[in-house]
Image (cartoon, grey):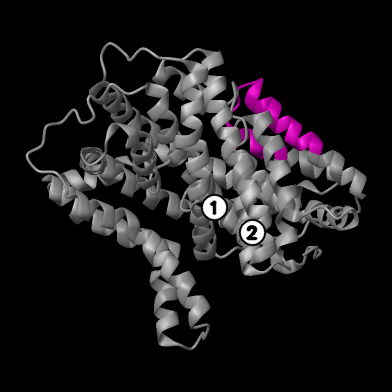
Amino acid sequence: METPVTPTLLAAGAPALPHTASNGQLLLAVLLSIGAIVLLITRFKLHPFLALTLGSGLLAAVAGAPFDKLLASFSTGFGSTVASVGLLIGLGAMLGKLLADSGGANTIADTVLARTGPKLLPWAMALIAAVLGLPLFFEVGVVLLVPIVLLVARRGNAPLIGIGIPALAGLSVLHGLVPPHPGPLVAVDALHADLGVTLALGLLIAVPTLIVAGPLFGRLAQRWVGPLELPAETAPVDTVKRERTPRFGAVLATILLPVVLMLGKALTDVLVDDPKSTVQRLFDFIGSPLIALLAATLLAMLTLGRAAGFDKGRISETVGSALGPIAGIVFIVGAGGGFKQTLIDVGVGQAVSEWSGKWHVSALLLGWLIAVLIRLATGSATVATITAAGIVGPLAAGMSTSHAALLVLAIGAGSLFLSHVNDAGFWLVKEYFGMSVGQTLKSWSVMETIISVVAIALILPLSLII
């Protein structure tokens, strides 16, 4: 597993940065650059895109790399990451926007809740959040789901935290562990992991993690936080009254289509394992993340948009409006890719590989710990995932397909650890649920920590089995 960095690890066309830095100098460069990124984001409130860009320059300077080579390396990393991940983020945003605007999300919520008794409400909310969380970014999922949670709490006279925590857990687990969310996608790209295998193992880890951090912890959090007053005016789940809404089966099939296609590709690769086979070549094409998400987005225009009565102009407007809000995410991810490529090219990955081999540190545990530290410092799960993947990337070179996927999941799990006051998600949850800082720490922050710890506790023994 502890294989040194090789040219195949570099992005196509990326020039290696010549350097003679010792491992100590490289370690100092990493610490200073990450420290600078943390300080710029938290203290000076600089946008993460700019912070990551400046951090890459500081990294190369301290490591002794020439700046002309740095620019080429950073640009190559930025371009390759946006090319591989940016398209998927855009398609995911379009699918999520169609799901929200068509009323498809409400169709799922209404159908599940109509068949659920009071005792099963926490489990139902976790299920709804997990299904909605597949195509939606976390922040979008929170905005979409909170009105549903408040409405269910009001109608069923249920405790807000008791059903709110399972819903938040469903969104957070999917966000950190399951592609096509930005964090896992970036890690898959950086570690050259197989997306289908990562998706399958991510779902395998996500289910028990969600059960523990959602419905089970929700009972305890409810006692810790106590009763919360519902807002005087609860926003309706759907402010637009429509004569037509998408059907439950069509909505569910649309959301699950990319998951089924990518899992089908992974299963075919295992069962057929013949590059010349027509069946495998077909599934390799339709199961690629770009084609799978593109197919789901095009299908959603019919099953969600047209089913809701949207005309062609309204569908086009809905799809187009999804791209503006994610521009910042794409630039952050791209800058993270540039920072990651700089880490690799100055030799940081090779130094980490040598260090971990000398001290016999598990690559999975190392990736988790690095992501935890960066998450605690920056409050950003995406920045934690990008940086950790760049640092431990060379360790994945000699790994099997399944272990590379588990390393992606370990980093994703670490990126969710202990959300606190430097995380925008912390304040989003606090304000939506009307909690104090202390109540948010005892509920949301503990829930995030449980997700991270339970996930790595499942990943490590699983790595010994498969």
Q: Nearer the viewer, residue 172 or 331?
A: 172
Q: What's the magenta bit mostly, secondary-structure-wise? A: helix
First to last magenta residue range: 31-55
Please provide percent x and percent y for residue 404: 65, 62
Mark 2 lies on a secondary structure that is helix
Please provide percent x and percent y for residue 162: 41, 27
Q: Which mark is residue 205?
A: 1
Please provide percent x and percent y for residue 54: 69, 36
CA distance separating discs 2 and 1: 9 Å
Mark 1 lies on a secondary structure that is helix
- 125 vs 246: above or below: above
User: Can see residue 70?
Assistant: no
**Neighbours of disc 2 within 10 Å: few (<14), some (14-19), many (20+):** some
Quarter of the image for residue 451 reads: top right
Q: In this view, does 79 lie to the left or right of 316?
A: right
Q: Residue furthest left?
A: 243
Measuring 44% from the left and 49% from the top, which residue is drawn there?
89
Measuring 64% from the left and 59% from the top, which residue is drawn there?
462
Q: Does residue 429 show up magenta in the picture?
A: no
Q: Which mark is residue 462?
A: 2
Kind of residue at badge 1: Ile
Mark closer to the chain start, 2 or 1: 1
User: Is there CB contact under 8 Å for labels 2 and 1?
Assistant: yes
Q: Residue 214 carries which label?
A: none
**Neighbours of disc 1 within 10 Å: few (<14), some (14-19), many (20+):** many
